[in-house]
Amino acid sequence: MITLTPIATVKNIRKKVEDDNWGEIVSVIELDPSLPEDALFEIESFSHAEIIYYFHLVEDARIETGSRHPRNNIDWPKVGIFSQRGKNRPNRLGATIVKILKPDGRQLHVQGLDAIDSTPVLDIKPVMQEFLPREKVHQPEWATELMKQYW
């Protein structure tokens, strides 16, 4: 058993789950009162951060463990849940690299976070170039098509 406690909460204008148009969304990640403000000290020296969050609205009955068509689009191949980034995953974890706009006290302003308002944040990590892929990234054609309107 693993127990995690959210370290922050997402605040933004997206109140319901939507699949596309996340690129211009500005979110405020507000630290939990149990954490000191200096937990964000010097975060602005990085251009991007990786946000790990919890898909808190996914119901147990919606969890996928096998394969399915991404976005239930039968024009795309059936692929395993670990071969896609859908929200109905066994542990309901999401991860996105966002642009850091600015820290402001206990808040971190970011752009491009694909999490709705009130989403619990489990971790914030600065993006370091050395952790990005060293090889060329490749993906199937359906994934490129799926992402056309995402950002």
Image (spheres, rainbow, N blue to C red):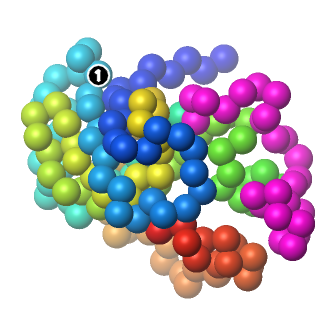
Residue where numbered disc 1 is placed: 32
- Per the picture, the main secondary structure of the magenta-coloured stretch is loop
Any magenta on residue 78? yes
Q: Residue at x 37, y 36 (%)?
A: 10
Give whichever of 57, 82 is nearer the camera.
57
Residue 89 at x, y percent in the picture:
72, 41
| Left or right for 128, reference 38 | right
Residue 131 appears in the figure: no
| Residue 48 image position (x, y, % from top left) | 29, 60
In this orientation, which residue lies closer to the viewer: 51 or 149? Answer: 149
Badge 1 local density, few (<14 within 10 Å), some, or many (20+)?
Answer: some
Decide if residue 67 is on the left or right side of residue 70: right
Nearest the viewer among 119 and 149 is: 149
Q: Quadrant of the N terminus?
A: top right
Magenta stretch encompasses residue 54:
no
Name the quadrant containing residue 17: top right
Q: Is residue 133 above or below residue 11?
A: below
* Residue 66 in view, yes or no: yes
- Residue at point 45% right, 20% down? 5
Residue drawn at (68%, 78%) of the image: 145
Where does the image place residue 36, in percent across and percent down from the top left? 17, 23
Give the side of residue 136 with respect to residue 30, left or right: right
Instruction: Please say if 54 is above or below 114.
Output: above
9 vs 11, nearest the viewer: 11
**Residue range corresponding to the magenta coloring:** 55-79
Q: Secondary structure at mark 1?
A: loop
Q: Amino acid at mark 1?
A: Asp
Counting from the top left corner in percent of width and height, residue 92 is at 64, 36
